[in-house]
Image (spheres, helix red, strand yellow):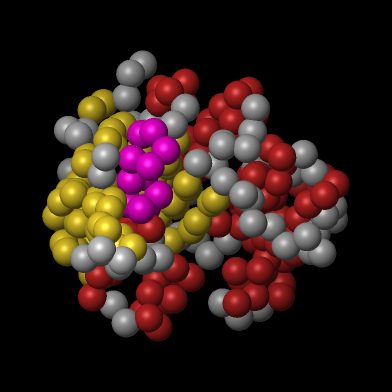
Amino acid sequence: MSDPLVVVEGVRKVYRNGPNEVVALKEVSFQAFPGELIAVRGRSGSGKTTLLNQVGGLDRPDAGRVVVAGQEVTAMPEDGLLALRRDVIGFVFQSFGLIPVLSAAENVGVPMRLAKLPAAERDRRTAMLLALVGLERHANQRPYELSGGQQQRVAIARSLANRPRLLIADEPTGQLDSQTGRQIMELLRALVRTENVTALVATHDPSLMTLADRVLEMHDGTLTTPQPATT
């Protein structure tokens, strides 16, 4: 077996509001391997988003450590985290996060502009990614001209722009109907295979669990024993 791409060891996160404390994560540990799609399941408030934020370097734990692609995220300075999020990790959010005034193609190209890729290479990869998610005919449309499912496909294409090794998706089907949500999850499943990325997908939808290689259960900040996905 190959080395894990993600290593989470004893991660603890506490949020404080005056004298009150909420323990969001309680000594969470797991590993994720290359080419694996892992679903993180749990009710709202169970700690799913907090866990993904630690792995993606969007937040820092109070204890424990996170390693992604051999780099210790929890020990990185801010400029290192920016580089990690730009070059190694792709993010997909429930809210799509597209820029309204830009076309689908321009939205996909934003990360490559920030990475200063030459225009010709950027255009080629944008076209390839839109084709990969089935939107090559919608390249010039703006987000308001697209359905919710199409907008999420654009967001997924954008997340792959800089060839990330890890894809983090936080409730990517949360704003979609069940059929469209399953199509998005099936797309993520296919992209894990074709792009050879590792994916961590937070969801509360039990119907999507069958598409994951493994399911991690979150309950009150605690991660239960990882279980194989039901087929």
Residue 42 appearing in the image: yes
Give the image location of residue 106, x and y in percent. 75, 64
Give the image location of residue 31, x and y in percent. 21, 48
- Residue 40 is left or right of residue 153, and the answer is left
- Residue 104 is left or right of residue 25, and the answer is right
Q: Residue at image x 65%, y 27%?
A: 177
> In the picture, which quadrant includes the N terminus?
top left
Q: Residue at image x 56%, y 77%?
A: 115
**Among the 4 quarters of the image, the one containing residue 82:** bottom left
Q: Nearer the viewer, residue 67 or 109?
A: 67
Q: Residue at image x 56%, y 27%?
A: 182
Magenta-colored stretch includes residue 153? no
What range is drawn magenta here? Answer: 42-52
- Residue 95 is left or right of residue 54, and the answer is right
Give the image location of residue 195, x and y in percent. 48, 48
Q: Residue at image x 43%, y 23%?
A: 206
> In the picture, which quadrant includes the C terminus?
top left
- The image shows a total of numbered marks equal to 0
Magenta-colored stretch includes residue 45? yes
Give the image location of residue 65, x and y in percent. 19, 63
